[in-house]
Image: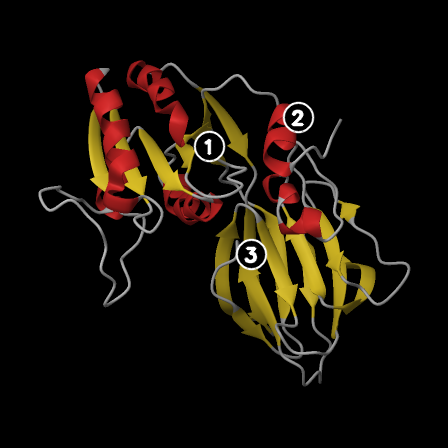
């Protein structure tokens, strides 16, 4: 059992939590490799152990049995794309604030020991394939575990866009933007914008953000639907697409964003015996009673 440990050095000072997890896993008989989830920014002074050998994720993932991420939900989202390409299951250890996607807290590291013997379950999570098209030209494409957000950015103006499902018009939105989320992302930005909380069924959720119309409502769509968000032709206002909170892609008049269910799911490791509703109460402060 080869387990890759990837810790966010900005949250895990000195990689102390990851090193403690390595001691637990190696004592149980697992082989471990330590990696950083991303390249540090130029000029950053990280608190890293001097004698610690660090490898690269893209080198280790093809032969890994499991990936453990230490950080907040952003660290897991960042790792999900690469891990999913290689079919590697992910387990998150929360070092952030909410950590809704994480399976364990830093105080629960002894629970990692059964991983060395393959004693865990896998939960598959839907992902979204997202493409930006300008005419018939592909501008960008990416994969989302949480959501694709089309918004007006920080400018004090409204955005206009048309939403279609399988090329049939669903609605026209005037407001701050729209969110197309997975069930995993239903407890993130979509929930804050008034969207429904959805457990694990594979379907996309469409949520308007601060729409300037009484008829705008969140919708839960069938899993096979292709959602298209299209900007009016001749529109001189720029909008922005962000995938899982990452770097924004600028959109202009006539651009369209096509979003569909990905053929590749993210595989999350489950160890703790917690129900979805227990996690909701614990992480989100009593959403359900």
Asked which secondary structure carries label 3, the reply is: strand
Asked which secondary structure carries label 1, the reply is: strand
Going from the N terminus, do you reach mark 1 or mark 2 first? Answer: 1
Asked which secondary structure carries label 2, the reply is: helix
Image position of 97 with respect to 115: above or below: below
The answer, for residue 200, to whether it is visible in the render is: no
In the image, what residue occupies the spot 23% across and 67% down? 43
* 106 relative position to 98: left or right: left
Q: Which mark is residue 9?
A: none
* 273 relative position to 17: left or right: right
Characterize the local packing of mark 1: few (<14), some (14-19) or many (20 or more) Cα atoms within 10 angstroms.
many
Kindly indicate whether the residue at mark 2 contacts the one at mark 1 (C-beta within 8 angstroms): no
168 and 57: which is toward the camera:
57
Kindly indicate whether the residue at mark 2 contacts the one at mark 3 (C-beta within 8 angstroms): no
The quadrant where residue 126 appears: top right
For label 1, the residue is: 267
**Number of marks in the image?**
3
Characterize the local packing of mark 3: few (<14), some (14-19) or many (20 or more) Cα atoms within 10 angstroms.
many
Q: Which mark is residue 277?
A: 2
Mark nearest the camera among 1 and 3 is 1
Mark 1 to mark 3: distance in Å? 19 Å
What percent of the width, then of the height, locates residue 92?
A: 42, 34
Which part of the image, by quadrant, shows the N terminus?
Answer: top left
Going from the N terminus, do you reach mark 1 or mark 3 first? Answer: 3
In the image, what residue occupies the spot 40% across and 24% down? 108
Kindly indicate whether the residue at mark 3 contacts the one at mark 1 (C-beta within 8 angstroms): no
Image position of 130 with respect to 87: above or below: below
For label 3, the residue is: 130
What percent of the width, then of the height, locates residue 157?
A: 73, 78
Going from the N terminus, do you reach mark 3 or mark 2 first? Answer: 3
Mark nearest the camera among 3 and 2 is 2
């Amino acid at each position: 059992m080869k387990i890759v440990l990837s810790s966010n050095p900005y949250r895990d000072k000195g990689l102390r939590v990851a090193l403690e997890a390595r001691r637990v896993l190696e004592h149980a008989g697992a082989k471990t490799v330590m990696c950083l989830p991303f390249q540090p920014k130029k000029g950053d002074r990280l608190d890293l152990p001097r004698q610690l050998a660090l490898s690269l994720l893209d080198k280790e993932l093809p032969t890994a049995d499991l990936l453990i991420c230490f950080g907040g939900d952003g660290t897991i989202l960042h790792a999900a794309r690469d891990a999913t390409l290689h079919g590697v299951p992910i387990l998150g250890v929360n070092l952030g604030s909410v950590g809704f996607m994480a399976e364990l807290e830093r105080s629960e590291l002894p629970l990692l020991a059964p991983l060395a013997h393959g004693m865990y379950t896998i939960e598959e999570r839907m992902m979204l394939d997202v493409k930006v098209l300008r005419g018939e030209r592909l501008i960008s494409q990416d994969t989302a575990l949480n959501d694709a957000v089309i918004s007006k950015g920080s400018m004090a103006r409204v955005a206009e866009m048309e939403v279609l499902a399988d090329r049939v018009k669903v609605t026209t939105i005037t407001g701050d933007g729209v969110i197309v989320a997975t069930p995993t992302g239903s407890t993130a930005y979509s929930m804050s914008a008034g969207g429904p909380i959805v457990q694990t069924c594979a379907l996309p959720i469409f949520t308007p953000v601060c729409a300037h119309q009484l008829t705008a409502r969140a919708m839960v769509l069938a899993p096979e639907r292709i959602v298209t968000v299209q900007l009016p032709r001749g529109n001189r206002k720029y909008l922005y697409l962000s995938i899982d909170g990452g770097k924004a892609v600028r959109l202009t008049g006539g651009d369209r964003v096509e979003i569909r269910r990905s053929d590749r799911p993210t595989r999350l490791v489950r160890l703790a015996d917690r129900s979805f509703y227990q996690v909701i109460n614990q992480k989100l402060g009593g959403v359900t009673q």
